[in-house]
Image: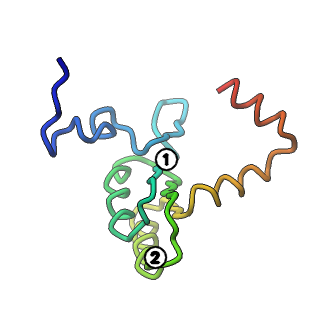
Amino acid sequence: MATKAKSGSLADFPEKVNQRIGDIDVNNENGSAFEGVEIKHEIPITSQLVADAYEKFKVHNTDRYYLLTTANMDSADWDAIEVEVARISQIHGCQVIVNGVYTTLKYYLRLLTTRQSLLTNMLNF
């Protein structure tokens, strides 16, 4: 019988159990994450979420961290987000990128030369 994890236990935070920094980690050959992606569904990104993300990767040599959301960010407090992003860049050196999931996908999909290359790469992943 499955048991529910107690609130606040490590089971609630799988990235803390297995040393992952995000929902998706891009690792070096030695297994250390140099890039991470965290995706929020319908949760607007705030400066506090940026600070929370930093806590996940601050002990790692992370070059870039994407904090993406499917939520509309039109009313976000971009000034506070940019202050937190700049603070992290200054003390850690990591480039934190806050953006929408769909905007990011459109941006990177334009770099593909053909749709066939997308399918080939997805099948080989």
| Residue matched to label 2 | 76
Identify the secondary structure beneath mark 2.
Answer: loop
* Crowd class of label 2 (few under 14; some 14 to 19; many from 20; radius 10 Å): few
Against 31, residue 59 (above or below) is: below
What's under tag 2, amino acid-wise? Ala
Q: Is residue 117 left or right of residue 65?
A: right
**Residue name at image x 69 percent, y 24 percent:** 124
**Residue name at image x 40 percent, y 72 percent:** 84
**Residue name at image x 44 percent, y 48 percent:** 61
In depth, the one of 2 and 100 nearer the eye is 2
Quadrant of the rendering where the N terminus is positioned: top left
On the image, the x and y values in percent for residue 56 come to: 34, 50
| Residue matched to label 1 | 36
Against 8, residue 116 (above or below) is: above
Q: Nearer the viewer, mark 2 or mark 1?
A: 2
Q: Is residue 97 left or right of residue 49?
A: right
Q: Are marks 2 and 1 in contact (CB under 8 Å)?
A: no
Give the Cα distance between marks 2 and 1.
22 Å
On the image, the x and y values in percent for residue 118 come to: 76, 36
